Amino acid sequence: MPVADLDLNALNSATKYPSIFTYHELAQGGRLIEKATAFTGDVILTEKVDGTNARIISLPGGDYLLGSREELFYARGDRVWNPRLSIVDALRPLAERITSPDTGAVVYYLEVYGGQNISRASGEYTSGQTVGHRLFDVATIQPSTMEQPRAAIAAWRDNGGQDFLTEDELTTVAKTEGIELTPRLATVAGSELPTGIEEMQAFLDRHMPTTLVALDPDVSGRSEGIVLRTSDRSVIAKARFQNYERTLQVRNKRR
């Protein structure tokens, strides 16, 4: 399945990373309401790194493509590429060495962060121009998926059709390929998660006081928040400091 034989629009659609809902439901105006995501069993807490969502699409025979969440920027062998967000420069060495699948596509989802213009939070991780990346998910895509009409592919993706690795599988792949994961903070029982907004902000402060992925020794900035996921990834949600602080500020003004 060389790149030249693929419908790149279909491949792009099939490999886009899905939206992750917030742990507490978002209402209009970006404020949270007291309706928390239900988790059962063990819940894995990981750092939510504030950068740009990127992907490596690994294909049989050694071909690969690199892109952001929405666009494809580079295919193996390109002499000219899109330099936006530092994705190609950051991920091309990794894409060149990872193991190619025998069939279909394996998609590595990573956060590229730091630098100067990658995100507004770059200064939380570096005092200069250092760029880093962390793996947070991997999915496998079968060839038959990319043969479907584009509307069918989008519907399949939006309805959870992508086959993501479990936590154990993800850990194994990261170790095998030598890729650093987003930091694992703790594993807690779903019944122990706070359901109130104020309690969840305290939970964030306790588990994520500073980032664990600073790129320079003189920087110890703030993380964006925490991602919560079951070990089989059947339930996943994000909790961002900004959402909780904004919600509580508005609430306190009304008192």
Image: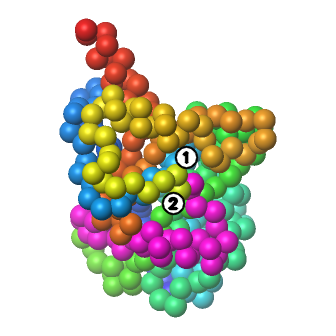
Q: In this view, does 3 lie to the left or right of 27?
A: right
Label 2 element class: strand
Q: Give the range drawn in magenta.
A: 154-183
Task: Identify which residue is drawn at 25% across, 48% down.
Answer: 37
Kindly identify the residue that appears in the image at 49 percent across and 37 percent down. Answer: 206
Q: Which of 156 and 178 is in front in this view?
A: 178
Element assignment for label 1:
loop
Q: Residue 136 carries which label?
A: 2
Mark toward the start of the polypeptide (2 vs 1): 1
Q: Distance between the residues labelled 2 and 1?
A: 10 Å
Residue 211 sits above or below residue 96 on the image: above
- Residue found at x 69% / y 57%: 90
Q: Do the residues labelled 2 and 1 touch (CB within 8 Å)?
A: yes
Residue 219, given in percent of the width and then of the height, sits at: 73, 35
Dot 2 amino acid type: Phe
- Where residue 151 sits in the image (x, y, percent)? 25, 66
Task: Identify the residue at horizontal 46%, vertical 45% (top origin).
Answer: 226
Amino acid type indicated by mark 1: Val
Place of residue 139 in the rendered image (x, y in percent of width and height, measured from the top left): 43, 72
**Pointer 2: residues within 10 angstroms few (<14), some, or many (20+)?**
many
